Image (cartoon, rainbow, N blue to C red):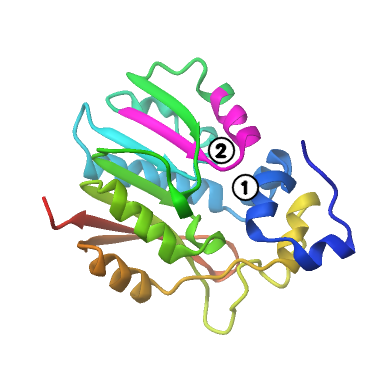
Amino acid sequence: MYRKIDAVDKINLSLRDAWSGHVTPEDYEQHMSAIGQAQANASLVRTAILKQTQPGANVLIAGAGTGQMFDYEHPGFLAPFQVTFSDINPEFLRHLERRLAGAQLAGWRTTIDDLENTRLAGPFDLLVVVLVFEHIDWRKGVASISLLAPRRCVIVIQQNPPGMSAAVSPTRTPPGTMKVFVEVKPVLIAAEELIAEMAAHAYRQLETLYSDVADGKKMCAILFENTAY
């Protein structure tokens, strides 16, 4: 159930509130496709998963959202894997389930989960996180990854051009409920900070993939390996 957020609500609204009960799937997807991030992230995730996993692998896509990526990459690339899709928003997961209803995958499930304080249990061979850390306490997210102890990780973050600090480009007006992020601002993460924090939890950087998107930004997919294995 989505609720309209008025000017008073915005004072106390958190990013968690925005994603768990305010932003609609339709507004989110319209925004992401308009700026090219949905398309870019779909390609990055497909490439990274196929580079990092073998048939039969157990894959977790955390913060999976609405499954918009499957508008741009056919879900068949996931056919050899057992895939868990998690998100904090049940309505987003319902959209994802509808997209996958006819896909011929080996096995998949959806579950409600909070990456800041995960209740999931591994083991997972690969964990994928796309543009989630900008919207949570990302160090808690890294701690959750450490608890889940996947063999490998793919973390996609946004990199802005020099001089632009806001996650939402100041020249753009997001649609509908996405306007909340003009008031409640996601926080971008420097790649070097993320790499250092992952290293502190026994994950070393393997490779970084990039994709250019609108407004001079880049999607940055950093691939990590668990050194404990």
Circle number at residue 33: 1
Position in image of residue 31 (x %, y %): 68, 51
Q: Secondary structure at mark 2?
A: helix
Residue placed at 23% from the left, 40% from the top? Answer: 125
Q: Horizontal and vertical percent for residue 32? A: 62, 50
Q: Is residue 55 visible?
A: yes
Nearer the viewer's eye, disc 2 or disc 1? Answer: 2
Which label number is shown at residue 215?
none
Residue kind at label 2, given as amino acid type:
Gln
Q: Is residue 96 magenta?
A: yes
Q: Position of residue 136 (x, y in %)?
A: 53, 60
- 2 and 1 marks in contact (CB < 8 Å): yes
Magenta span: 82-97
Relative horizontal placement of residue 24, taking residue 202 as reference (left or right):
right
Across and down, in percent, residue 135 comes to: 56, 60
**Could you tell me which quadrant the N terminus lies in?**
top right
Using the image, tell me which numbered label, if any, was put on residue 68: 2
**Does the rendering let one see residue 221?**
no
Examine the rendered structure and indicate whether residue 92 appears above or below residue 27: above
Image position of 151 (left or right of 74): left
Quadrant of residue 223 within the rendered picture:
bottom left
